[in-house]
Image: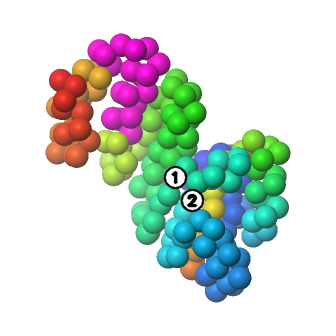
Amino acid sequence: MVKFVNETFIPARVHVKDDAEAFKRYGEQYNAHWTPTVLELDPNGEEFYRLEGFLPNDDFLAQLELGRAHMDFKKGKWAAAEKRFREIVDNLPQAEAAPEAMYWAGVSHYKATNDAGALKETAKAFTQRYEDSSWAKKASIWA
Amino acid sequence: MEIKFRHDVDTVLKEAKKQNKPILLDFSAAPM
C-alpha cells in the first residue's frame, strides 16, 4: 500500500488538530469535514475520487487503486483503466472494491473495443463470483 | 517504509501540476 501511494501520488496530509488552519481551509475547499477523508486529486487539483471513513489495509488499497483506475477511465484511457481494474480483482479478490472493479474492467474493455461480448462475458463472470453483490445485479442486464 | 506525507498543500498542488502527477490528500486525525 505504501509503495503504491508513494509511486502513484504526491501524498499530502492535513491534520485536524496539528494543522487546524489548513484543515479548515482545505476542508472547506474540498468539502471534507470528517476524518478520515482521503481525496484523490488530479494534477490540476480537481477531485476525482473520495474515501470517507476507516478501512482495513487491503480494502483501503483496493479503493485507492479503484480511484486511480477511474481517473484513467474518465480520461478515456480504456486499456490502462481496464488493466488497473483487473489488477484489483486479481490481486485483492476479497476486497469490497473487487466486484466494482470487475464491473468496470468489463466496461473499459467494451469502451476500448466496442465489442458487446465484453459486457456479456462480464455478466457471465458475475454468475461465478461476487454473485450476491450489487455489481452482479448491475451487470445482469448484459447477460 | 512509510507514506511520505507532505504538509505544504499549496506547494504540493503546484508540484503536482508541474510533474503531471495526482495527489492523495488525507484529512486525518491520526496521531502524528
The residue identified by callout 1 is A49
Q: How many marks?
A: 2
- The magenta span reads A101-118
Q: Distance between the residues labelled 2 and 1?
A: 6 Å
The residue identified by callout 2 is A39
The quadrant of the rendering that contains the N terminus of chain B is bottom right
Using the rendered image of the protein, determine whether residue A9 is visible from the camera's viewpoint.
no
Q: In front here: A15 or B1? A: A15
Residue at image point 45% right, 49% down: A62
Q: In this view, does A8 lie to the left or right of A68?
A: right
For residue A122, the mark is: none
Q: Where is residue A143 in the image (x, y as percent from the top left)?
A: 18, 23
Q: Is residue A125 left or right of residue A43?
A: left
Q: Position of residue A29 (x, y in %)?
A: 63, 68
Q: How crowded is mark 2: few (under 14 residues within 10 Å), some or many (20 or more)?
A: many
Which structural element holds mark 2? Answer: strand
Q: Where is residue A45 in the image (x, y as percent from the top left)?
A: 68, 54
Q: Label 2: chain?
A: A
Residue at image point 47% right, 19% down: A112
Residue at image point 43% right, 22% down: A111
Hey, what amino acid is under mark 1? Tyr
Residue at image point 53% right, 36% down: A74
Q: In front here: A67 or A46? A: A46
Q: How crowded is mark 1: few (under 14 residues within 10 Å), some or many (20 or more)?
A: some
> Does residue A107 show up magenta in the picture?
yes
Q: Do the residues labelled 2 and 1 touch (CB within 8 Å)?
A: yes
Answer with the quarter of the image where residue A105 lies: top left
Hey, what amino acid is under mark 2? Leu
Q: Label 1: chain?
A: A
What secondary structure do most residues of the magenta stretch adopt? helix
The reply to whether label 2 and label 1 mark residues of one chain is: yes
